[in-house]
Amino acid sequence: MIGGGWQTVVLLCLCLYAGNSIAQHAGGGFIRADGGRFVDEDCNEFIPSGLNTWQLLEVAAGKVKSKPVMLENGMADVVQWTMATAAANKLNVVRSFAHGVDGSFPLQIKAGKYSEHAFQALDYILDEASKYGVRLLLTLVNNWDNADSKTQYIQWAGAEGHDVFFTDPEVKQLYKDHIDTMVNRRNTINNRLYRDDPTIFAWDLMNEPRCDCFPDFIPVPDSYVSCRPECAEKVQSWIDEMSKYLKKADPNHMITVGEEGFYTKGSTGELVNPGTGWASLTGQDFIANHASPAIDFAAAHIWPDNWETWDVDFLEAWIKQHAADAKAMGKPFMIEEFGKEVHLESGAQANITSIRGPFYRKVYQQLQESLAADGPLKGVIFWQWGFAPYVAEEFLQGCIHCQAIQVSSSDGVFKNIIAPVAEHAAQVALNRSPVAGCKPVPTAKRAQTLVMPGTLPLHQTSDELLASSSDSLSADNAVFGSSTGSSSQQHQQHDGISFDNTISADKTGSNTVRMGKMLQTQSRAKPTAHHHAATGR
């Protein structure tokens, strides 16, 4: 752990784990896409269930004040608690920004100069995730104006205009240099190069790449250069070039775009776009973007509040269209961000259940149906994981929409929808036979397995793992997710989602968890109300 005064005590306490259990480093080696599925080195299907974190890098570095968490076997820090809670609830993927969010704490300080403090925090996150068998989906850069954003690259190159990020030769070279630095980073804790670390699930080229198209009204005058079709062509060319470059620099890990998944004007999927036309002008083209040869899987985001699209049925149409398009490409599809705001006032838990519940239930039901029918939707990662009450109150106060969007481990949505689905998905994966037609990775090419002493069992239930903290948590809050049981003959129902754990080898009835994401605003002027959804987070 980097920064803070109690970490030494935490690490000493965690030594109590040694001798009690040994966990293998992210078992199954590198995850890859094969035949429209995610598989491990032995061709066993991998079903991604996960959560999104916000400022995990800053928490790991001690830039966000936090306090220790009491686990059954000793004290832990917030990073360890997050990974332990994920593992205990069968959440096997954590999506995190592999760069700063807070402008005062960037990973890359200026072109080619990096913060070793920030990099060691990322080393720590990777190392801790490996101990719990959790994998990381990492973003390389951010579209939005904050630390390590495309705006920074443009400034470093002395260029002008937001869209030149995708075309300016010097800017593109700076991005390629960053790729080289990331994949060749040697972890200061376990001595492993990032490109050789199977803890990394995949790379996002960018968090939500877009053209700078934020019109005041629709239809858009031709004077809005960023809204012209040519910008989408620039984005496509950038995706093709950078995904190819990254794949050559790091052939071990999967790559996806990291976009919301909007359809360009005139495409077959345009009718499912949110809003009144702005989405088709963002420069994204879901089909073309993910059909790029070096892109391994398709991914999309869902933001009902940002997009001002609060019809639950929209979620179903959005997911089915993207899933069908991914299937046509022969690539697995996942929702890598999904969130729903709940403004907590009186009757907070009732608000969460009545407002957030229907949206989460709809997404998870779509996933259940897809997996049961062997469809292309293979995973969901929700946004965002709630660090409260283990981080300082000023973090929540200074984090726009943090309290409204975060999913607490004590929420009914987590305990009755997310955790049961993840538990079910894990059981299905265990019951499933290796994927037909898939070729196991030859022994000589497999990732070196790290056996990490002093870690927790990967299949320990939340009740066994997590106890109440020394703070004023209630007994209910101390249980991070409800165990759904693992009997192969058990039938369960949680909050309207039915699970049949009697799974044959060729049945796909599993599920994953999504990672919705908190909102962050741009430093530019706020767009008008009818399209503010286009601003992202």
Image: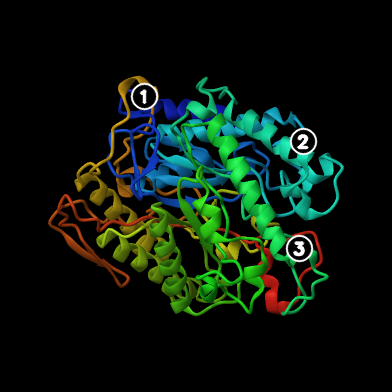
Give, as a three-letter code, the residue at label 2.
Answer: Ile
Return the residue at label 3: 226
As drawn, is 525 to the left or to the right of 204?
right
Q: Residue at x 39, y 38 (%)?
A: 31
The quarter in which the C terminus is drawn is bottom right
Q: Position of residue 321 (x, y in %)?
A: 44, 68
Gap in angstroms between the C-alphas marked 1 and 3: 56 Å
Give, as a three-letter code, the residue at label 1.
Answer: Ala
Camera-nearest label, 1 or 2? 2
Which one is earlier in the sequence, the residue at label 1 or at label 3?
1
Return the residue at label 1: 18
Q: Residue at x 79, y 64 (%)?
A: 225
Asked whether the beta carbons under mark 1 and mark 3 sit within 8 Å of each other, the answer is: no
The quarter in which the N terminus is drawn is top right
Q: Position of residue 286 (x, y in %)?
A: 54, 60
Residue density around tag 3, few if under 14, some if 14–19, many if 20 or more, within 10 Å: many
- For numbered disc 3, what is the local secondary structure? helix
Q: Position of residue 415 (x, y in %)?
A: 37, 61
Asked whether the beta carbons under mark 1 and mark 2 sit within 8 Å of each other, the answer is: no
Closer-to-camera residue (531/329): 329
Gap in angstroms between the C-alphas marked 2 and 3: 28 Å
Q: Is residue 1 visible?
A: no
Count every numbered label the image shows and give the total. Answer: 3
Return the residue at label 2: 109
Q: Residue at x 69, y 37 (%)?
A: 107
Q: Quadrant of residue 442?
A: top left
